[in-house]
Image (cartoon, grey):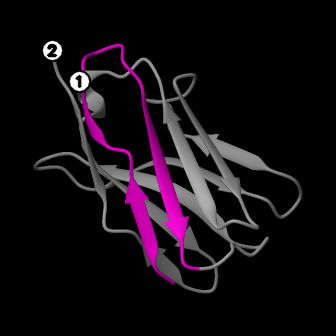
């Protein structure tokens, strides 16, 4: 499966960005879609994930809760990470992940939050 992440850019603190992840096929109901990020010199960390086995269920890291929203469209094979009230510590490369029987990763999209 090919995953294409896009929507990154440079914004000032307090700004918003909308990241998109487009897959080369539809998502299966049993698959989990997630976003991870990696800041310079740091390990990749979990940001948010969403499942749809028993209805849509989203989980976000404490550091982004109430600021980021994840959603997905199984039929279209797309996922969105809406990021609001961005902070400098949100800076990093954001990766889309599709987890099911196997793990698939997108190429990443750079997000820079700076004044």
- Residue in the image at 62% along x and 79% along y: 25
From the top left corner, tell me how far across and down residue 16 is, in percent. 41, 24
The quadrant of the rendering that contains the C terminus is top left
Q: Secondary structure at mark 1?
A: helix
Q: Is residue 65 left or right of residue 112?
A: right
From the top left corner, tell me how far across and down residue 105 is, in percent. 41, 72
Residue 88, disc: 1
Q: Is residue 38 left or right of residue 5?
A: left
Q: Residue furthest left?
A: 41
Gap in angstroms between the C-alphas marked 2 and 1: 8 Å
- Residue in the image at 79% along x and 70% along y: 29
Q: Is residue 102 magenta?
A: no
Rate crowding at label 1 as few (under 14), some (14 to 19) or many (20 or more) other CA atoms within 10 Å. Answer: some
Rate crowding at label 2 as few (under 14), some (14 to 19) or many (20 or more) other CA atoms within 10 Å. Answer: few
C-beta proximity under 8 Å, tags 2 and 1: yes
Residue under numbered circle 2: 115
From the top left corner, tell me how far across and down residue 4 is, in percent. 42, 67
What is the quadrant of residue 32 in the picture? bottom right
Give the mark count. Answer: 2
Q: Is residue 53 left or right of residue 35?
A: right
- Residue in the image at 55% along x and 85% along y: 102
Q: Is residue 25 left or right of residue 43?
A: right
């Amino acid at each position: 499966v090919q995953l294409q992440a896009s929507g990154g850019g440079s914004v000032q603190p307090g700004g918003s960005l909308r990241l998109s992840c487009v897959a080369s096929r539809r998502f299966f109901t049993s698959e989990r879609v997630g976003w991870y990020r990696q800041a310079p010199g740091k390990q990749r960390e979990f940001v948010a994930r969403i499942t749809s086995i028993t209805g849509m269920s989203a989980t976000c890291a404490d550091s982004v809760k109430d600021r980021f929203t994840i959603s997905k469209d199984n039929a279209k094979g797309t996922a969105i990470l809406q990021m609001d009230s961005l902070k400098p510590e949100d800076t990093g490369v954001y990766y889309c992940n599709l987890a099911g029987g196997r793990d698939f990763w997108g190429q990443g999209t750079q997000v820079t939050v700076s004044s």
